[in-house]
Image (spheres, helix red, strand yellow):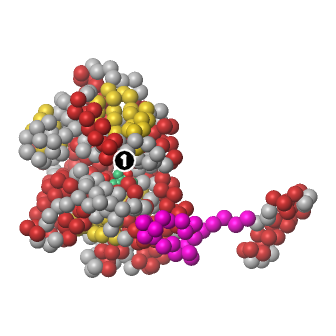
Amino acid sequence: MTADLFPTYRGRMEYFCLGCGKRFPTNELYYTCPDCGGVFLLDNLLFDELKKTPGETWRNIFDGRAASKKTALRGIFRFYELIAPVLEEEDILYLGEGNTPIVESSPSLNAATGLKTAYKNDGQNPSASFKDRGMACGFSYLRALIRKHGWDNVLTVCASTGDTSAAAALYASYMGDAIKSVVILPHGKVTAAQLAQPLGSGAIVLEVPGVFDDCMKVVEHLADNYRVALLNSKNAWRILGQESYAFECAQWFDWNLKGKCIFVPIGNAGNITAIMAGFLKLHELNIISDLPRIFGVQSHHADPVYRYYAADETSEREYAPVTVTPSVAQAAMIGNPVSFPRVKYFAEKFEAIAGKDSFQVLQVTEQQIMDSMLQANRNGHIACTQGGESFAGAKRALELGLVTADELCILDSTAHQLKFVDFQNMYFDNSFPPEFEVTPDTALANKPELVITPEEKENLSEAEYTTTTADRVVAKLGLKKK
Ligand SMILES: *Cc1c(COP(=O)(O)O)cnc(C)c1O
Ligand SMILES: [Zn+2]
């Protein structure tokens, strides 16, 4: 097979409800199960056909496509057969998502932690978070539906104060014409930075009084009654796209995941669901022989999944939503994750193959999250607060004796550092509201220093100004003459 050819294999996909088990065809736009309201997964009924191709052949195909110049195969759809093999080439939307690098931590950072860590920088996606992986798939599917049905207008809707809105608005703006993107937000509850991306992409931004959950109820009502595509994380097509994170981790390490531990922050739990699902597919097709170990990480301010798995015995486990308190890992601050049934479903499959310690959930403090993010960023990483959460999770795992320095901890920085810079500012200015429970380490505060005042400048000639300023810099830095 030439790597540049668009694949000829086609699967047959169905929605499958984790609540009641019913199945539904994918020629319709379903968000949740019309019968019981449960969450869906997407199942390829012809997946077994892929098993006829040996693992080694798959590895070669995917490696070959890594050098492809064909746009439809350059991003997450390099793994076409494993994601949504019902799309045609013309349906596939590529805005440069996926293929994010894995950057090994410096020797000095590893020496400081006693761990071997590396960051997968998912903030290097087009809208600066991993959400683009799911949107690329969700929008490609929409494009296929529009083509098949000849629709001339589809409204994409989401309620999200952050990265989901940014990603949805970006992909919708690229598609133009038939797609109009609407973002519904709680009035007065979002920051300028959170508004900037959807506004910049030209989305219709509607504000309603109330909190995020009120917005969610409005958009779900719209999805139940009108032809709108709801892009929040219950949308099962997003999960498929996000599986590409797992495929890329495997390919980066030449398909050898022995001794690798994957750390993922958990919010609505879609990302960790997708990552487990992705590794399981690779394993089923003999593309990898070892599953990595998966560690979900939650803040003590939003930890329902941690609490559930904290009970060792399955029979003692009980799921209960929690009331969240403010978290610097704002994108993961969720008390009742919509994908929790999906986590349970895949965690069981993971443990059945790789043993009880192959999937675990850790709890870290807000303080540890902030300190870890700053430590990572002061050592050449571009981690966001959720990336700090992954790192804090790896340190916690070492403390609990769950990982060793021989293993490689792959930390998910789910967004770019710059998206969450407000928290860095609060740390440096020591201005965290008390409910965050973060006390800055003042040794880490970094502030600009004024070398010369505007008044001083006014009283100096241009030449004096240059030499006086330079002299002050020399004195501050203790520079020696050449
Ligand atoms: C959405 C998001 C998360 C949480 O992911 P889930 O799939 O909801 O668990 C974490 N980090 C960032 C930056 C996000 O945007
Ligand atoms: Zn159902």
Residue drawn at point x = 40 percent, y = 62 percent: 327
Q: What residue type is labelled 1?
A: Val
Quarter of the N terminus within the rendering: top left
Residue drawn at point x = 29 percent, y = 21 percent: 151
Does the magenta portion include 437? yes
* Residue 461 position by quadrant: bottom right
In the picture, measured across the screen, residue 213 lies left or right of residue 102, that is left
Look at the picture and state if 219 lies above or below 258.
above
Residue closer to the observer: 324 or 453: 324
Q: Is residue 330 visible?
A: yes
* Residue 73 position by quadrant: top left
Look at the picture and state if 154 lies above or below 121.
above
In the picture, measured across the screen, residue 15 lies left or right of residue 185, that is left
x, y percentage for residue 67? Answer: 37, 45
Residue placed farthest to the front in the image? 209
x, y percentage for residue 405? Answer: 33, 78
* Residue 72 position by quadrant: top left
x, y percentage for residue 252? Answer: 34, 57
Q: Give the range drawn in magenta.
A: 429-450
Look at the picture and state if 403 lies above or below 186.
below
x, y percentage for residue 133? Answer: 34, 45
Look at the picture and state if 282 lies above or below 226.
below
Residue position for label 1:
211
Q: Which secondary structure is most common in the magenta stretch?
A: loop
Quarter of the C terminus within the rendering: bottom right
Does the magenta portion include 462? no
Residue drawn at point x = 55 percent, y = 62 percent: 425
- Report helix, strand or loop for mark 1: loop
Q: How many C-alpha atoms fall within 10 Å of the one at disc 1: few (<14), some, or many (≥20)?
A: few
Could you tell me how many numbered marks the image carries? Answer: 1
Residue closer to the observer: 71 or 363: 363
Question: For disc 1, does the CB lie below 8 Å from ligand 1?
Answer: no
